[in-house]
């Protein structure tokens, strides 16, 4: 590891020592930006060295905010497949479509990238307890990695959280507390717990936890490698808090600064129509400070049911710098896309994981994405996370006796 990173507030410029685990700026409450000395990183990191390392997240250690490899907490995360689409792409008339399948991470979602960096940083700072607000996936990830580190993980979730996700959290030893109301209420309680008890908040939004974004960006590194050091024309990504979008933009920017690539992709942000404050901000041309919370958020995609995009201060400028766009999708479109990903590509996605692919259909129909452009679509979580979301949309299978003649009529 190359200990060349800095931790500095984006608002007031206050700096923090490298070993310290920082949430929001302790002076003004601003977002902490972690930066790297690219000239120093470039002395020890190049394409050849990267290729010679195990294909996991920590192969990019020079670009991660940890001082010692002894503090790494890992479950073997990273190296998720970039799947070239055939049938799904053909139906849309696309020639260069790929799915980045983050469902293949250890706990089944992209949040494992956030967790390995956040909990490794917690270990480095000798933290004993962490707190998080989550709809379920981030809570499962943080609980699993906390278990590996011997750190207590306290979890606030909205009362609408999917039971199967909460079972995963509990199995990993996380202490779950369900909170009435919207996601915003559990977010508030996690922040209150940090203020009252001093526990680091490892929620996956940079306003509370800058290390989550550092984990997210490694997905962008992998895409570039998997495309033979090329940058996609488009990245299509679901947006809730905006951390995922901001993290990927940071990753593409890192590789661009190091000279590994010579451009960055356009980003298409996709939200659920029942909770779309980020899309609304893009359409209105709002400044980050002008973005309003969404009233009465409602969508099957719990992972993007954030009534406020907490990382809008980072995500909105990133989208605009990329010359990107934002679109919304309905719950019925999400369900149909989940079916399509499974039947056409063999990808089993939860609702949030299918949001970006559902948005892709709009982007192609509007000719925003051309048939010859190379697009990568994020699949952010496994269908095993929320099996009930699809079960009512399929008929029950037949039950028959062990008689081939009886079975024949069902085998056509």
Image (cartoon, grey):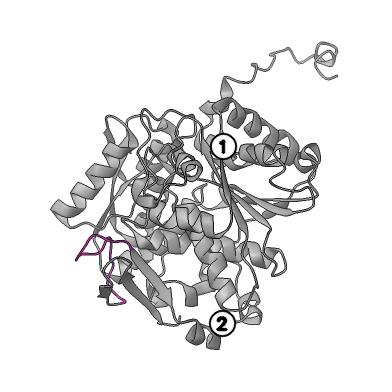
Label 1: which secondary element: helix
Label 2: which secondary element: loop
Disc 2 residue crowd, few under 14, some 14–19, many 20+, Cα 10 Å: some
Residue at image coords 37%, 67%: 33
Q: Residue furthest left?
A: 196
- From mark 1 to mark 2, how far is it between C-alphas? 36 Å
- Report the magenta stretch's main SS: loop
Left or right of 268, for residue 153? left
Measured along the vertical axis of the image, is residue 315 above or below residue 264?
above
Depth check, front residue: 128 or 86: 86
Residue at image coords 67%, 64%: 231
In the image, residue 242 lies at what x, y percent?
Answer: 45, 50
Residues at badges 1 and 2 in contact (C-beta under 8 Å)? no
Measured along the vertical axis of the image, is residue 364 above or below residue 407?
below
Image disc number at residue 383: 1
Measured along the vertical axis of the image, is residue 295 above or below residue 113?
above
Residue at image coords 39%, 73%: 66
Measured along the vertical axis of the image, is residue 53 above or below residue 231?
below
Q: Start and end of the magenta stretch?
A: 18-31
Q: Earlier in the sequence, mark 1 or mark 2?
A: 2
Depth check, front residue: 325 or 142: 325
- Quarter of the figure that contains the N terminus: bottom left
Image disc number at residue 45: 2
Left or right of 338, for residue 302? left
């Amino acid at each position: 590891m190359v200990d060349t990173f800095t931790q500095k507030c984006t608002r007031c410029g206050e700096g923090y020592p490298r070993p310290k685990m920082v949430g929001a700026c302790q002076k003004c409450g601003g977002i902490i930006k972690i930066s790297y000395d690219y000239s120093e990183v470039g002395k020890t990191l190049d394409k050849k060295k990267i290729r010679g390392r195990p294909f996991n997240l920590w192969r990019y250690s020079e670009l991660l905010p940890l001082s010692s490899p002894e503090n790494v907490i890992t479950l073997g995360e990273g190296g998720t497949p970039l799947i070239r689409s055939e049938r799904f792409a053909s139906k849309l008339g696309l020639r260069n479509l790929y799915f980045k399948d983050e469902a293949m991470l250890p706990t089944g979602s992209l949040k494992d990238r956030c967790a390995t960096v956040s909990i490794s940083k917690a270990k480095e700072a000798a933290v004993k307890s962490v707190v998080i607000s989550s709809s379920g996936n981030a809570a499962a990830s943080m609980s699993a990695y906390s278990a590996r580190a011997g750190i207590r993980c306290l979890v606030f979730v909205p009362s609408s959280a999917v039971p199967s996700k909460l079972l995963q959290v509990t199995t990993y030893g996380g202490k779950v507390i369900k909170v009435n109301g919207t996601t915003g209420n559990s977010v508030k309680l996690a922040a209150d717990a940090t203020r009252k008890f001093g526990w680091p908040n490892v929620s996956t939004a940079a306003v509370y936890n800058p290390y989550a974004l550092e984990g997210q960006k490694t997905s962008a590194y992998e895409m570039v490698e998997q495309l033979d050091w090329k940058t996609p024309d488009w990245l299509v990504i679901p947006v809730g808090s905006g951390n995922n979008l901001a993290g990927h933009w940071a990753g593409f920017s890192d590789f661009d600064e190091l000279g590994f690539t010579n451009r960055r992709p356009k980003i298409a942000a996709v939200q659920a129509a029942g909770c779309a404050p980020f899309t609304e901000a893009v359409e209105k041309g709002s400044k980050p400070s002008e973005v309003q919370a969404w009233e009465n958020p409602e969508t099957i995609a719990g992972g993007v049911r954030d009534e406020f995009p907490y990382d809008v201060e980072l995500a909105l400028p990133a989208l605009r710098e990329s010359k990107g766009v934002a679109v919304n999708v309905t719950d019925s479109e999400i369900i149909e896309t989940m079916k399509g990903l499974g039947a056409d590509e063999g990808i089993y996605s939860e609702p949030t994981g299918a949001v970006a692919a559902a948005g892709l259909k709009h982007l192609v129909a509007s000719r925003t994405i051309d048939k010859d452009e190379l697009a990568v679509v994020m699949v952010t979580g496994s269908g095993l996370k929320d099996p009930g979301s699809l079960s009512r949309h399929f008929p029950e299978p037949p039950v028959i006796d062990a008689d081939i003649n009886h079975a024949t009529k069902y085998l056509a």
